[in-house]
Image (tube, rainbow, N blue to C red):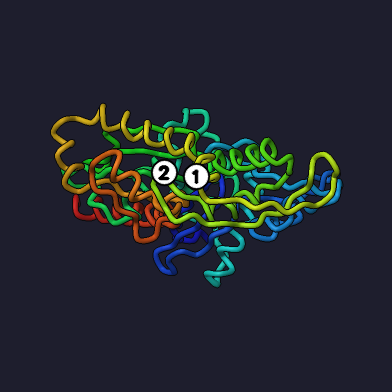
Amino acid sequence: MFSNTHIGIDLGTANTLVYTKSKGLLLNEPTVVALDTKTKEIIAFGEKAKEMIGKTPSSIEVIRPLKDGVIADFDVTTELLKLIMQKAGKKLGTALRKPSVVVCTPSGATSVERRAIQDAVRQSGAKDVQLMEEPVAAAIGAGLPVNEPVASMIVDIGGGTTEVGIISFGGVVASNTVKAAGDKMDEAIINFIRKEYNILIGEPTAEEIKKTIGHALVPHTVEQMDVRGRDVVTGLPKTIHLSSTQIQGVLAESLETILEAIRATLEICPPELAGDIVDHGVVLTGGGALLKDIKEWLSTVIEVPVHIAPEPLQSVAIGTGKSYFISERKQRLAK
């Protein structure tokens, strides 16, 4: 028997989210898997696998099968999606038999990358797979009037990529994708601490530093944080003291790249829609929208209002889930 279940999937570099109309946000798991190096079988995925990063023996490898918003390891991604759908089915209280799926893709993805995402979702058990551009999904999830003749500008700062899009009449009018996002910020923090202090830290520690004392490029009250890592010279554990101004400087390059993407998108925006953006402003979604002071910084440098979506981490997933029902309602009204 085929199920008439319709789900939306935000297949992100950092997290994979599943949304259904009946239950809302059903699942939010890190896009991380732990593999047995001999059998290549998945031992753990999601939060359990993320907790294993940097702590496993040589017989277990922890990997992230998506890189910069696209699939880096097709087979592992397919198996991960199967496990995610099984877990989502358990939360729904029923097996997800051949669901119809809407999944988002970066606006800058090539046709080959889009096909890879579509094939991976289909091989994981989906009956019907529809692809949706990430800025549109984020705008729907943020509650913007995407189907009206009004410009909505969205900046989705995710794990692998930052998507900037101007949407009108349900489509993307202008867009830009840059690889300056959460992962690049974490990588910059790791490199800075190694270069400045000769201390090695892992990705989870870098992410925690960014969340705790990371700030956008505006004056702020200085915050301090103790960080533990391994001394490159002695090989022994060591604790260092970091300030928020140091991390602010480290994040500057990624933030400037995001700013350039926003400016480039505004430059190619049709003049008729530019006035709408001045009136309604820019909406931030994704994990990067939670960086301290980013709203204040952007509103100052681009001189238009900046808002943060009600649920920035969930906007894309909510948008993919709702989009099916929007298109379904349109078809019924057309009849």
Q: Is residue 244 left or right of residue 82?
A: left
Residue behind mark 1: 248
Q: How many labels were placed on the picture? A: 2
Residue behind mark 2: 217
* Residue drawn at the location 33% of the way across and 38% of the way down: 165
Q: Is residue 231 left or right of residue 212?
A: right
* Residue drawn at the location 26% of the way across and 27% of the way down: 268
The quarter of the displayed image where residue 169 is located: top left
Q: Is residue 301 above or below residue 86?
A: above
Contact between marks 1 and 2 (CB within 8 A): the answer is yes
Q: Which mark is residue 232?
A: none
| Amino acid at pointer 1 | Gln
Residue 10 at what x, y percent from top left? 48, 50
Mark 1 burial class by Cα count in 10 Å: few <14, some 14-19, many 20+: many
In the image shown, does 162 or 187 lie closer to the viewer? Answer: 187
In the image shown, does 293 or 78 lie closer to the viewer? Answer: 293
Q: Is residue 118 above or below residue 319?
A: above
Q: Please tell me which of labels 1 and 2 falls first in the chain.
A: 2
> Does residue 161 appear in the picture of this structure?
yes
Mark 2 burial class by Cα count in 10 Å: few <14, some 14-19, many 20+: some
Look at the numbered disc 1 and give the secondary structure of its residue. Answer: helix
Q: Is residue 88 above or below residue 182?
A: below
Residue 142 at what x, y percent from top left? 33, 55
* Residue drawn at the location 43% of the way across and 54% of the way down: 292
What's the CA distance linking mark 1 and mark 2? 7 Å
Q: Is residue 123 left or right of residue 310?
A: right
Residue 225 at what x, y percent from top left? 60, 57
| Amino acid at pointer 2 | Leu
The quarter of the displayed image where residue 149 is located: top left
Q: Is residue 146 left or right of residue 182?
A: left
